[in-house]
Amino acid sequence: MATLTGIKDYQYGLEKIFPEADDFLPLLGTDYVELYVGNAKQAAHFYKTAFGFQSLAYAGLETGVRDRVSYVLQQGKIKLVLTTPLQSDTLISDHIKKHGDGVKVIALWVDDARAAFEETTSRGASPYLEPIVEKDHDGEVVKSGIHTYGDTVHMFVERKNYSGVFLPGFEAWKSEYNPSSVGLEYIDHMVGNVDWNQMNVWAKFYNEVMGFANLISFDDKDISTEYSALMSKVMTNGNGRIKFPINEPAKGKMKSQIEEYIDFYEGAGCQHIAVATKNILHTVGEMRKRGVEFLHVPGSYYDTVMDRVGQIDEDVKALKELGIMVDRDDEGYLLQIFTRPVEDRPTMFFEIIQRKGAMSFGKGNFKALFESIEDEQRRRGTL
Ligand code: FE2
């Protein structure tokens, strides 16, 4: 396990902080996340209104694209692309039919998309997109892509010779409806759910094919309640900007939440996107006002939380009102909260996280969190 010491400023520097990670795939950060959805126009409205995303770019019939529409939204450094097909006989339609709304592309920002493709495919990655150059009057972008778990893919995006609003083929999206930001800043981590006995397979993939190190592991004793369990390995790239925890179900008395996800997503896929804020009280207060549904944290959680985490800057009453959880590690503490699934299938959800030194993932909250998820599973008849 990698040490967590001395990496507090990880998101601001490019220096290598995980010596176990290899250098053959330098990643500058997350470029964008693309969801395939049933109705991108309505999803875009939801992410603007409820999550405070801003209109950034658009591609569709009006811009010369015939088979799909894509709305690009931005908040802080986070770019979300929402894509809906315009015909039934397309790969995008197949994806939505099988999985419902979900993450298709986790795009990674690189300096050299050709090298990224070469380095990963030569180590065993299955190619999704051979390197291509896309151009418009704002310059050119080189893209390539590889497959990861399930039907999810990683695109490598090289944009150093591009000055346009998003990617070639997209136009700036000017809207008269611009709800304010809620203060989301960057993607902290994105979690993949994989099937039974597949966690080590995919941890090995991120290690061998992408050069990632194993930051931390959780076994079924760390993540279990009376009824259900899961296991998780957190993989990180060398500069710590990209962190991918990989979960698999573990045996319990009842059905693991990971199994529920796999059943309803019909395969492996992205379980949650954790987005960081500098002021979680403001962010979550706004999101609640705007109709975002969060997991319920039992009131009794707050009776003992201060004994566990010690002194914090926030008023525990305010945290309790909003249902925000706290955890502490050797480096500091973190505040976090989880939304309910954001689509009808009980699949993908968001985490809102504020790090105050802590570099971990809220292990002290796992039990309360999973009991809360079990309550929801019980109501859905999927426990
Ligand atoms: Fe998370």
Image: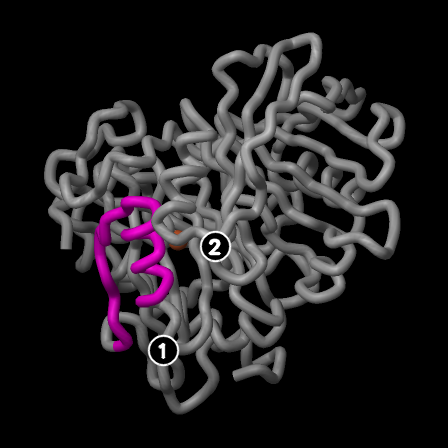
Q: Residue under circle 1?
A: 229
Q: In the rendered view, does 47 fall on the left or right side of 230?
A: right
- 112 and 154: which is toward the camera: 112
Secondary structure of the residue carrying tag 1 is strand
Q: Residue at x 77, y 43 (%)?
A: 40
Residue 148 - label: 2
Give how far apart the Cα atoms at labels 1 and 2 are: 24 Å
Q: Is residue 73 magenta?
A: no
The single residue placed furthest to the bottom in the displayed view is: 253
Quarter holding the N terminus is bottom left
Q: Residue at x 88, y 31 (%)?
A: 61
Secondary structure of the residue carrying tag 2 is loop
- 317 and 322: which is toward the camera: 322
N-terminal-most mark, 1 or 2: 2
Query: Which amino acid type corresponds to the residue marked 2 in the rendered image?
Result: Thr
Q: Which residues are magenta?
A: 200-220
Query: Which amino acid type corresponds to the residue marked 1 in the rendered image?
Result: Ala
Residue 184 seen anywhere in this rendered image of the structure: no
The single residue placed furthest to the front in the displayed view is: 122
